[in-house]
Image: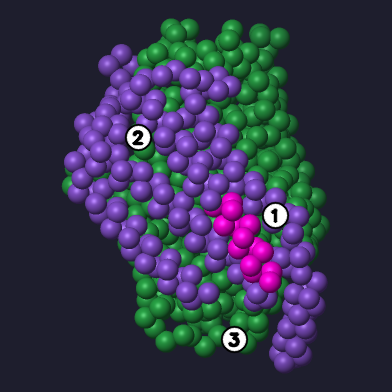
Amino acid sequence: MEAYRNPIILSFVALYMLLCIGVGIWALRRTKSTHDFFMAGRDLGVMVTAFAVFSSTLSGFGFVGGPGLVYTLGTSSVWMFVCIIMGYNISFFLLAKRMRLFAELGNSISLPDVVGLRYGTKSTSFLVSLAILLGVLGYLATQIKAMAVVLQDILVETDFLVNINLEMCVIISCSILVFYSVTGGIVASVYSDLIQGGVMIIAATLVFITVVYTFDNGFSEISQTIQEHDPEAIGPWGTLGMVGCLSWFFVFGLGGSGQPHVITKMMMYKKVSDARFILPVSIGGYIFSALLWLGIGLAMRALVLQGVQPELESADAAASQFLQHYAHPVLAGVVFAGLFAAIMSTADAFLNIGTAAVMHDIPKAIGKTIKNELFWARTTTALITILSALFALYTGDLIAILGAFGWGTFAAAIVPVVVIGFNWKRATPMAANIAVISSLLVNFIIKIGQKYNPEAFAIPYKIDVGALALTVSLILFIGISLASKPPKLDPDVEAVMDL
Amino acid sequence: MDTIVKIFFVFLLAFGLLIVALWMSDVPQNATGITDADYKTLVHSGQTVATTSATKWLAYFFGMGIIGIFGFVIFIGGRKKEATIRKKMYRVLAIGMLFYFLVFNAMTNSWWNYVETNSMDYFMGIPKPTAWMFFGLMTIPLFMSFFYITKFKQWVYTDEDEARFKEILENRQQRNG
C-alpha cells in the first residue's frame, strides 16, 4: 500500500475534482436566472446551508496555515477557533433571521443589496461593494495560489509530472473552479460545499485519531513533550502571549459575523425557522474540522522536539509532512481531497460575492443597469478568476498584503454596518459610510506600513490590526449615529426590524 | 434599545482607552515570543504579561472587555418588541454571559497559578488552564445556542412574526405593483 501512496493521493484528488465538475453540470440545469445564480433561488435546505456556512468559514487556512501556526506558536492560534461557538451565536442571534427577511423583502441578490435596502442609500451599498471587491481579490488570489502549490506538491511526487510548474497547476485548479462556478453559480458552490464539508469533517476526525495514535501515550505525551521544552507553548496563550491571542479571539469571534462570503449564505435558506437547525450543524461541522488544525500542529511540534521528525523547512508544510509520513495513504488521500475541498469552497464563495459586486452592486450603486445579467455574471466569474490567478502568480508582496487584509477589513467594515445596523434603527447612512471608510484606511495603512517600515508600524503585543480597526469603526459608527438626527427609515424596513 | 447602545458606546470608549494604555505600557521582554535557539521554525515564549502587575491587569481587563463587547452585541440581537419575550431572552443571555465571565476568570486564574508555581496539573492530557480554554470557554456559549434552537418559535421568530412579515410583504408587493 505504501508504494502506491502518491497514486492513491492523486486518485482521491482527481476523484474529488471530477465530482466538482459533475456538480457543475447538474447545477447548470437549476440555474435559470440571476436570482438562481447568486441566491440559489432562496431555496436551500438546512444541511446545505449549514455545511456552506462552516466550510466557507474554515477555508484552506484551517488545513494549511492553521496547523502551521500551531506548530510555530503552540496553542496561540487556537484562539481563532475557541471563539467559534460564540461567533456563530452572534451571527445567528443578530443576523440569520434579519438577513433572510431583508433578502425576501427587497428581493435582494447580494449583501450590498440588503445594505442599500436597510440604509436607503446607494453610497453605503457602493462602499460595502468596494470593500468586498478589494477583500475578494486578495483572498481569492491566496486561495488559488494555495490550491496550485498543493497540487504541484502532489504532482511532482508522481513519475510522469515531476517537472510540472506552478503556472500549469494554477491553470488546472482554476479550470475546475471556473467550470463549476460559471455553469452552476452559487447552486454549484453550495452543493459542492455539502460534499466538501462532509469530506472535511471525515478527514479531520480521522487525522485527529491518527495524531493520538502516533504517540504511545496519546495527547498526554504531546503535551508533556511541548511543556518540557517551553511550558507556555502548551499553556492557554501559546508563545504569542495573552494580549495577542485575545485580539484574535475578538476579531475572529465578533468578526466572523462580518465575513460576506459566510453571511450571504444566510439570505439563501428556504424557511426562516430553519435557522435554528442550521446553527448547531454549522457549529458541529466547524469544531470537527478544526480538530485537524489543532491535532497536526501540536503533533508536528512534539515530533520535531522528540527528534522523530526533522525540523520543517517551512511551518506551512506541517500538514503535508504529517500526512506524508504518519497517515495511512488512503487517509492522506481523503485529507488532500479535503484540503482542496476547503480551499475551493472558500474560493467559490468569494467568486460569487465578487461577481455580484462587479456586475450587480457597483453598477446599481452608480445608477447603471446591466442587461442579460446571467450571461454577464458567468463572464465576470471567469474574468475575476483569471485576474486573481494572474494576481496570485505575478504580484508578489501585494497578494500577501491583500490576503492578510481580508478578514480584519471585512470584520471592521461589515460588523458595525450590518450586525449592529440591521438591529438598531438609529444607525445612520453617514455613520455606516464612515465606518466602512475607516476600516479600509486603518487596515490598509497599517498593513502596508508594516510591510515597508515594520519598526514604525509595530503594534505592541502583536495586537491584530483587525481588532484595532474593528474597535475604531464600532466607536465611529455608534458615536456618529448617536450624534446625528435619527434617520427616516422605509416603513417596511422599520416594520421588519421590529420582528 | 438606545439605552443599551449608549452604554455599549461608553464601554467601547473605555475599551479603546484600555488599548491605548496597553500601547503605552512597558511591554515585557520578548512578550510575543522569540525564535527558538535550536529550531528556526519554532517560536519560544518570552516573558509573559503576568511578569508585572500593571501588564497582568491590563491584559486581564482587555479579555474582560472583549467578553463584555460580545455580551453587548448579543444583547442587541436579543431585542424583541414584546416585553415578556424580551425579558426571558435577556435573562438567558445574561446567565450565558455570566458563565462566560466566570469561565474566563477561572481560566485566567488557573494560568496565573501555572505561571507562578509551574505546577503540572493536567486534565484529559492537557494543562489545566488550556483545558479551561478548550472545554470551558469554547463550549459555554452552547448554553445560549441551546435556547436559540429550542425557543426559536417562542422567542426569535414567532407565528405572529411570520404572519406580520407576510402582511408586510403583501402590502409592499401591492404598492409596487
Q: Which residue is mark 1?
A: B147
Q: Which residue is mark 2?
A: A241
Q: Along the horizontal axis of the image, is A371 left or right of A319?
A: right
Q: CA distance from mark 2 to mark 3?
A: 48 Å
Q: Is residue A174 one of those drawn in magenta?
A: no
Image vertical order of residue A5 relative to residue A406, above or below: above
Seen from the viewer's position, the closer of residues A439 and A191 is A439
Name the spot of residue B70 as percent of width and height, x first: 49, 55
Q: Tell me the chief SS of the magenta region.
A: helix
Seen from the viewer's position, the closer of residues A201 and B85 is B85
What type is the residue that disc 3 sits on?
Asp
Are the residues under badges 3 and 1 in a single subunit? no
Q: Residue at 65% x, 34% y: name it.
A: A288
Of badges 1 and 2, the one in the foreground is: 1
Instruction: Choose top left, top right, bottom left or bottom right for residue B176.
Output: bottom right
Image vertical order of residue A298 relative to residue B100, above or below: above
Q: Residue at 62% x, 38% y: name it.
A: A287
Chain coloured green: A
Whether the residues at callouts 2 and 3 have beta carbons within 8 Å, the answer is no
